[in-house]
Amino acid sequence: MRRILSTIFATLMLSSLTASAQINLVKNGKAKTRIVCTDNNDTNQQAANLLNHFLELISGTKLPIVQGTPTYKNAIILGEQTTKASHDGFEFATDNGSLHIKNGGHKGTIYGIVTLLEKYLGVNYWANSSYTLHKQNNITLPIINYAESPAFRYRQTFSYGNDDPIYKLWFRLDEPNEVFINNMWVHTFNQILPANRFGKAHPEWYSFINGKRQPGDHSQWCLTNPEVFEAACQQLDSIFKANPELKMISISQNDGNNTNCQCPECKAVDEYEGSPSGNIIRFLNKLATHYPDKEFSTLAYLYSMNPPLHVKPLPNVNIMLCNIDCKREVPLTDNESGKWFTKALEGWGRISDNIFVWDYGINFDNTVSPFPNFHILKKNLQLFKKNHATMIFEQVNGHRGVDFSEMRAYMLGKLMWNPNMDSDSLMQTFLHGYYGAAAPYLYQYHKIMEGALLASNVPLWIYDSPISHKDGMLNKHLLKTYNELFDKAEEAVSNDTTLLKRVHMSRLPLQYSELEIARTEVTDNKADIVKKLSLFEQKTKEYNIPSLNERENRPADYCKLYRQRFLPTTETNKAAGAKVIWSIKPAERYQTIADKALTDGLYGGTTYVESWVGWNGEDADFILDLGTIKEISSISIDFLHQLGAWILLPKGGYYATSLDGKKYEPFGKYEFAEDRDLSVKFVKGKVSTSKPVKARYIKVHVNTLGNCPSWHYGVGYPAWFFMDEIVVL
């Protein structure tokens, strides 16, 4: 009996102590405590205001905010520092009836409040201005004692929460302008020493490519030239003086591949170091020594991805390593392109503890198309952490309409903070929180598509097309299954306008894929395509989808062009099925399709991976045999303009006609003006005559642009041009 009474007494005492240690924030809708800021700085004020914002939403009341010391009882105390957490981390410590949220550095106090709201007060943030919470009149906190630090000191991702300041705080995101001086964080060579300012007087400062100096917007520096270092320092002195508040800046190569200097001096260093990164790191180390109080970030990108053999970056040199060429259907450790990057990452990790990984997570050529890579996010981030990455940029192009953009940003925000979280649980949590009763069907959609992708053995990459997967994860049987699941998802939330709109918007990538695949198939029944196109046009307008790709091509323009380009017209192409006789063939990789692709009636889309035939730095020349003599009044060829892929318009071309294939008469010529527009577009090389001519043979000649111009990414290298359909009327 004594033992029983003793146990009861101990339990009552423990309950009493626990109750007294709990912090009552709100009781019966009235504030029962206060927020104490021990230091009146912006971070503490933001943290206090964030807590009060949600307390008011939950209970209808706010807590008083006061300045004071950490000795307050029964309070939320902000502003103390802790050594138990790193940069952006925080410590929860319950003491004397108060909860202390201590800062490990930078925004740790704010992120402690976010964790408090999410983990203990039941607030969940899903997307831009989208959150859920439980209203209650009484709010009590338990005893909380632990510290938490992020896996990476810098975490950036694309989202469309720019008009929602809470979104960025909730997902603990950084932006370049908060860290990098003057927002100079990538591709800065031409910002520091602009070729249009210095190139004419000092061409020797810029890359030596294919036998000559090539100053240009995307040319690189001659890093072994001592004058370049002195000139860069003069510019940096002014930049640092004008921006004393920040310490980090990017000194990094311009966008473009293999445009590094190949003069004898630079080439010798590259060969000794085993990579062009050797020259870059030597140069950056000189800057890091010259400015020891600054941190210099530089790119390991395309030609400079692999680490040098001998030189090692100084501690204040940050390596921004990019995996742009890798496929995404499996983790980076599991396919050939990923293993190549992983080897480079491990190499950099052996010589540096200051690595910034730029990871790509969406299809840039077709952002509004399925991109089922959710299953690889966790493993890749764990790989980065293991190899000393301290900064992460997940470029997922998260504008409205991108494939499950909200869920992609949600999962990445969580995993960049803690890559050990369970990604499947994160997906399920988001789907249920953001889509409600539609969640089970959308989860099934993702899992079926993920399995279909892996089973197909078709790579997933960032310049992909849905057409690449039309026999795999987007085959007709699977498309039917996906649509059935979306039908069920829509039905499940049909009585909730907000949730239904979210499901509708998430269906757009599937609808876009169906349209893209449909234009590659010859069919007489276009009624269904017309209906789907109208629905896609309606929904993209209703939900204000800004673009369909990285080059800002608008959905309305796509739909208009689809009707003009891909749907049948009353005109009959007299070149349909014509035989092609080559004089100058296309690049080897396109020769397998070239004989039919120019006359098969199927037009290429914005991605050059299908239907297009390309020439690299050479003219095109061939004869078109129509089979019989026909009257001809116009001849035209479609050309692709896609600057980001080094695909430029040719100079122009001409056509000639013949009855016998021996004697040719000029039909006409066309020319193209220089076009620096980054948008993807289709441009016709068309010649018409008022008086029809008779001919069986048509000679087609296209004049190459030659090398890419000085303003282009490929300065000094051959430009591509692509054509698809030849139309003769």
Image (spheres, grey):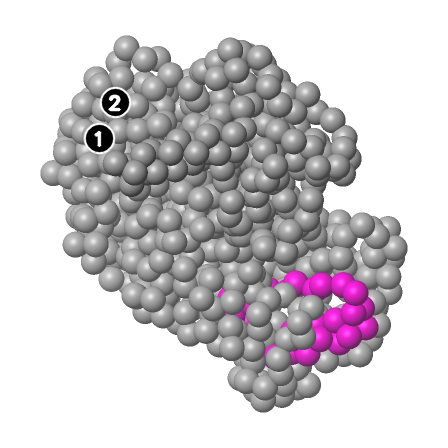
| Nearest to the observer: residue 296 or residue 550 | 296
In x, y percent, where is residue 491?
A: 21, 17
Q: Residue at x 36, y 63 (%)?
A: 332
Q: Quadrant of the C terminus?
A: top left
In x, y percent, where is residue 177?
A: 69, 46
Q: Which residues are magenta?
A: 278-306
Looking at numbered disc 2 in the image, what kind of residue is underneath it? Ala
| Nearest to the observer: residue 633 or residue 542 | 542
The mark total stands at 2
467 over 164 or under it: above or below: below
648 over 492 or under it: above or below: below
Q: Could you tell me which secondary element the residue under label 1 belongs to?
A: helix
> Mark 2 = which residue?
437
345 over 689 or under it: above or below: below
Looking at numbered disc 1 in the image, what kind of residue is underneath it? Pro
Q: Residue at x 53, y 55 (%)?
A: 152
